[in-house]
Amino acid sequence: MGGPLMWALLLPLLLHQAGSQTSSCSVLSGYMDWTKEYFDTCLNFSGKILTQLPQNQSLRARSVQLLDLSANGLQRLPWSFFRDLEQLQLLIVTNNSLDFVDRALAERCGLELLADCSCALLDWHTDRQDNCSGPELPRCLDVPTGAWHNLSVFLDVSCPSGLTKIAIGALAASGSLLLVLAIAGPVLAWRFCRHRMDQNLSKTWASQDGSRSGSGRQPRYSSQGRRPKSPANTPPRSSTPDYENMFVGPPAARHQWDELRGSSRLRDRTRVSRIAGRRFNL
């Protein structure tokens, strides 16, 4: 009975000293077993390199009032991990690069969150202001200087447009995409226009070739050479010329010439027969 009573008396003092990041309980040793049930009112898991908390179960520590998760490389604080910690009053998550804090944690008005100054706390802080009222002013740790600042003042100065890390990353990614499109857009447009020009030129040449083939004429640039025509078959000529003297004139003159030619042929035959007769008599 002395233990819980002592923690009840010392807890206000511990909460007051939390700003100096002094944990009241020693760091738990050994391997982290999330199925284990803890009955302590103060749990110190700092420097355990947890990197991430379970997404589908709550820490089994219903009596815990101070939970130290500092210096673990955490990026997310899911509501499911803190769902059953109804007695939790102080959550220390400093020296973690948080980019997400579940907004359901802002409904726990009795919970004080100590974290590094970051725009990731904007949504949590906004919901807390809407749900909770009180003189307490949330604080955040400036890691380079080690000083504590008013979280509201930090968010107003450093995150005037309400930009979280996720929003800033999305804007950076969209800016990079626009830059890529600005560079690649003209190149793609030039390639598309060139492709269309090549298609139109191919269609023009195809239409010209079709018209030439339809007219029966050979294309201008043809690989087919002209072959010499083979000479026509002509009958062989005789070695002796075959000709006949012909005279063109009036019919009377032609008749006289025929008579003379006939008498000369008769004399030649008579002469030949005489010579043949002589030879026979010999």
Image (tube, rainbow, N blue to C red):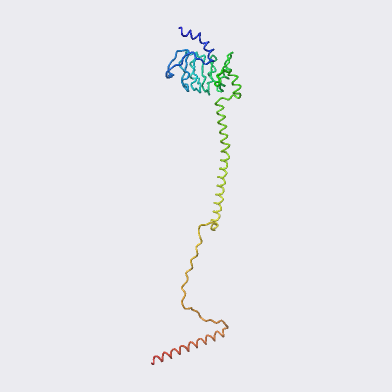
Image position of 170 with respect to 18: above or below:
below
Location of residue 272 (image quadrant): bottom left
Instruction: Please state if 118 lies on the left or on the right of 56 as rendered.
Output: right
- Which percent across, then down, holds residue 45? 47, 18
Frontmost residue, 15 versus 59: 15
- Which percent across, then down, holds residue 118? 56, 22
Q: Quadrant of the C terminus?
A: bottom left
- Which percent across, then down, holds residue 109? 55, 15
Image position of 278 with respect to 127: above or below:
below
Give the total of numbered labels.
0
- Which percent across, then down, holds residue 72? 48, 21
Q: Quadrant of the N terminus?
A: top left
Instruction: Please state if 269 lies on the left or on the right of 148 as rendered.
Output: left
Location of residue 214 (image quadrant): bottom right
Frontmost residue, 129 versus 196: 129
